[in-house]
Amino acid sequence: MQHTRRTFVAGIGTGLGAPMLIGATNKSGSSKPILGEGSHQYEVTHDWGDLPAGLKYGNTHGVCEDSQGRIYVHHTVNAASEKHDTMVVFDAKGRFIKSWGAEFEGGAHGLHINKEGSAEFLYLCDTKRALVTKTTLDGEHVFTIGYPDKSEAYKPGADGKNQKYSPTNLAIGPNGDIYVGDGYGSSYINQYDSKGQYIRTFGGPGKEKGQLSCPHGIVLDTRGETPNLTVADRSNTRLQRFTLDGQHIDFVNHLPAPCHFSIFKNGDMVVPDLFARVTLLDKNNRVITQLGDDSTSDYMSNRKLKTEAFTPGKFVCPHGACFDHLGNIYVVEWVEVGRVTKLRKV
């Protein structure tokens, strides 16, 4: 995988306490772990969702919920899998509904859902083929955005070779503009209109204001007076906020390896952190709590193990997360056997 996943492993300190793991038995009599504290407590169900026979997860990278409460999981497919569908759809109880998307095998990554009029659409990032594809909820292709060759930032270098491009996640603006994070490529954000026509490029590699290093995740943040783009500037160990036309606003600096975002209607934001924890932030981007923190473990080795080796109530390498309409959280992890965890709000 990308070198940025391994950056900053040594010597990172968060200055934050470990999350609460409450007893072996919770108040409902279940033996499932409870994470969090106060009004932010969650019952843990690892390996949530019943996969159909013949389909085995690869790295689970993206997750979202549609307006009917169905959960979509985007994964790369295990080499031992008989089926090759990368998109798996479940009902709210974890029962399998359908699967599709074999064309994304090996590159399935970012996943975004957007309501447009009376219909909903999925936007999928493919890191292997370097594409962003818009589909219906059944996987019918609407359009595809390829290499950003209209951007001056991506013109061939002196050696005649193209700049690397590998999109990881995207966000949709209030007017339908599409903002694509080139997380595994050249660390730019590329902006398109709702039809996929190029508008501008901003960001680019570096540590200074407005510069990025592995813009792995991105979200439209409407919690303040003015909407902004919040970017998971992962290899710079921070979040960075931009205006909708790509101007730097500020940084949020207390997240070692932020991957992506989901915002609940009360203003809480969940941030999966690749370094073995999930962070909840309030509407002012202050830490509420850390969930399933195992950041002192050898998570980069643990991610290669089988499911039974994972510690209950702890995360290994969280990569994507989303709130559902009830405030439950679904977390998917960058582990070779894939893992989907449901955090049920209690």
Image: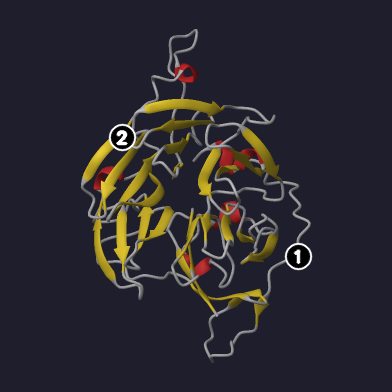
Q: What mark, if any, has residue 17 been given in the picture?
A: 1
Res. 210 image quadrant:
top right
As drawn, is 200 to the left or to the right of 242? Answer: left
Which x, y percent locates residue 327?
A: 50, 70
Which x, y percent locates residue 109?
A: 41, 46
Q: Which of 100 and 202 is in front in this view?
A: 202
Q: In percent of the image, x 30 and y 50: which residue is there?
A: 121
What amino acid is labelled 2 in the image? Answer: Lys
Q: In percent of the image, x 49 and y 71: which residue is there?
A: 328
What amino acid is labelled 1 in the image? Answer: Gly
Q: Which of 319 and 135 is in front in this view?
A: 135
Residue 129 to residue 174: above or below? above
Residue 180 to residue 43: above or below? above
Mark 2 neighbour density, 10 Å: few (under 14) some (14–19) many (20 or more): some
Residue 161 to residue 305: above or below? above
Res. 243 image quadrant:
top right
| Residue 107 visible in the picture | no
- According to the picture, the residue beneath numbered tag 2 turns out to be 195
Q: Which of marks 2 and 1 is nearer the N terminus?
A: 1
| Residue 236 visible in the picture | yes
| CB within 8 Å, label 2 to label 1 | no
Q: How far apart are marks 2 and 1 (CA)?
A: 45 Å
Which x, y percent locates residue 346?
A: 55, 80
Res. 282 image quadrant:
bottom right
